[in-house]
Image: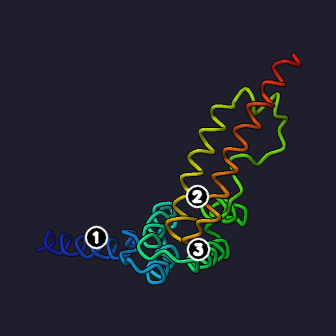
């Protein structure tokens, strides 16, 4: 009898523990506004460790119904994320700029090109190429900002040429 009582109490305890675990499966809706609401609910209820996966899912929902207004929806989501303490203001800005702005986050910094950028030129260009792919997703596929994406692509190629010339000049000055 006592053993049965212990088993029942243990089962109740385990059941109560399981019910406190948040559902972090992520947004299921293909509608961006609904998916954002679902993500906010889950993030506010303990699923903040899954932020990157949720953001990727939201980008997918945006791709399913691309329109210029999606930029604003992502901006508002990132401001909310910062207000909730899920991201710092700078992290939220970096997320937005990486996908929805023509400027390259990979190039920020106050480093001397000759001493820092040139020795790492291939990595810098690789990082920019990956970021250009993210800009294609955000600017072109989510928000239909063809002009913005092609401007980012043009900037990428201009930086590539300027960096090559700069590094050649740096090598000649040694």
Expressed as whole percent of the image width and height from the top left, the position of residue 162 reads 77, 37
Q: Secondary structure at mark 3?
A: helix
Closer mark to the observer between disc 1 and disc 2: 2
Q: CA distance from mark 1 to mark 2?
A: 46 Å
Q: Quadrant of the N terminus?
A: bottom left
Residue nearest the observer in this picture, 25 or 32: 32
Left or right of 144: which side holds 5?
A: left
Residue named by callout 3: 74
Closer to the chain start, of discs 1 and 2, is 1
Residue named by callout 2: 135
Residue found at x 72% / y 37%: 161
Left or right of 46: which side holds 132?
A: right
Q: Quadrant of the C terminus?
A: top right
Closer to the chain start, of discs 2 and 3, is 3
Closer mark to the observer between disc 2 and disc 3: 2
Q: Secondary structure at mark 2?
A: helix
Residue found at x 58% / y 74%: 74
């Amino acid at each position: 009898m006592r053993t049965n009582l212990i088993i029942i109490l243990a089962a109740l305890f385990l059941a109560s523990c399981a019910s406190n675990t948040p559902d972090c499966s992520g947004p299921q809706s293909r509608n961006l506004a609904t998916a954002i609401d679902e993500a906010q609910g889950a993030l506010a209820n303990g699923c903040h460790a899954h932020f990157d996966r949720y953001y990727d899912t939201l980008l997918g929902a945006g791709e399913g119904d691309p329109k210029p207004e999606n930029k604003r929806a992502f901006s508002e989501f990132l401001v909310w994320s910062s207000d909730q303490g899920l991201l710092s203001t700078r992290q939220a800005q970096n997320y937005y700029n990486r996908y929805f702005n023509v400027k390259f986050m990979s190039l920020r910094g106050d480093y001397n090109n000759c001493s820092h950028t040139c020795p790492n030129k291939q990595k810098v260009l690789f990082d920019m190429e990956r970021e250009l792919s993210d800009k294609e997703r955000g600017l072109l596929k989510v928000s239909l900002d063809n002009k913005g994406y092609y401007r980012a692509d043009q900037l990428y190629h201009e930086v590539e040429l300027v960096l090559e010339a700069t590094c050649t000049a740096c090598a000649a000055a040694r």
